[in-house]
Amino acid sequence: MISINLEKKLNTYQGKHLLKVFVEMETGNLVKISGPSGAGKTTFLKMIAGLTSPDSGKILVDDLVWTDTSANINLSPQKRKTGFVFQDYALFPNMTVQQQLEYATNDQNWIQELLAFARLEPFIKHKPSQLSGGQQQRLAILRALAIKPKVLLMDEPFSALDFKTKKTLIQELKLLLDKNSISTIIVTHNPKELEALPGKELFIGEEE
C-alpha cells in the first residue's frame, strides 16, 4: 500500500496557490493525474521523488516512511529508489543508448529486455542527439525502468510520440508494469491518451 498526503504552497504566474493532494494506491497499481497548467502536478511528482520538500504531509510506501514532516523524516532520493521520466527527457548528452541504461543497472538481461520492449536495439550506439524525439522519450522511460523502481513517476511521458507509436508503447508499457508489479504515477495533459491503462484517476486543481 502507498499512501501520500502532502501540502505545499506554490507561487505561479497566476498567483499563490495551495497544492493539497491525498492519494492511496495498492502496490503495483497505477494512478493517472491530470489538471490545469500551474496546478502543481510536476511539483507533486518531485515531492514523491524527494527532489522537492512539502510544507507538510506524509508519504508511506509499503510501511516505509519516505516523508513525515511532523517527525522530521525526509528520505533522500537515492533511498526512495524512484524512477523518474522527466518532461524534457534529462538524458546524458554524451552517453550512448547502451551507456544510459548501464549507468542505471548492471543487469544486462534486463537491459536487453528493455531495449527489445522499446525497439531500440538498432540504436544502442547512438547518442541522444542522433535520436528522434520519440526515441529519446522511449529511452528516458527505459532508463527510469532500468533501476526496477519501487515507484515509477512519469511526467508527460508520451508527448513527443505520434498516435500510432504512442498507442503501441502504452499497450506494451501496461504489460511491462504488470509483469514487474511496478507502482506507477503518470501526469498527463490529455487523460484520453491513457484510457488503455487501467488505474485510478486523480485531478489536481488549484486552491486559494
Image (cartoon, grey):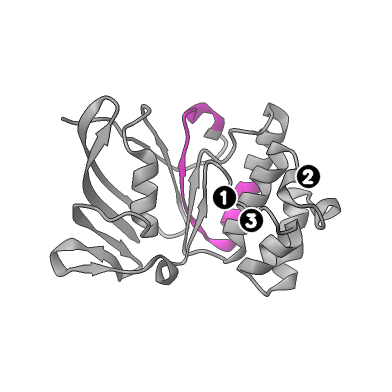
Give percent across and percent down for residue 56: 17, 54
Question: What is the CA distance from the residue labelled 1 to the residue labelled 2?
Answer: 15 Å
- The quarter of the picture where the C terminus appears is top left
Quarter containing the N terminus: bottom left
Q: Which residue is mark 1?
A: 90
The alpha-carbon separation of the residues under discs 3 and 1 comes to 7 Å
Looking at the rendering, the stretch of residues picked out in magenta corresponds to: 172-193
How far is mark 2 from mark 3, CA to CA? 13 Å
Q: Is residue 33 left or right of residue 54?
A: right
Q: Is residue 1 left or right of residue 138?
A: left
Can residue 188 be seen here? Answer: yes
Q: Provide residue 13's location: percent of width, then percent of height.
A: 30, 27
Specify the farthest residue to the top.
14
The residue that appears at 69% across and 29% down in the rendered structure is 162
Hey, what amino acid is under mark 2?
Gln
Rendered residue at 36%/27% (across/down): 36
Residue at 62 percent of width and 48 percent of height: 173
For the residue pair 39 and 30, the one nearer the viewer reads as 39
Quadrant of the image occupied by residue 168: top right
Q: Where does residue 101 sit, x and y in percent of width and height?
A: 68, 63
Amino acid beneath label 1:
Ala
Residue 19 shows which numbered tag? Answer: none
| Outermost residue to the front | 94
* SS at circle 2: helix
The kind of residue on which mark 3 rests is: Phe
In this picture, residue 203 sits left or right of residue 116: left
The residue wearing badge 2 is 130
Q: Secondary structure at mark 1?
A: loop
**Is residue 38 covered in magenta?**
no
- Judging by the rendered image, the residue that carries numbered circle 3 is 92
Q: Residue furthest bottom?
A: 106
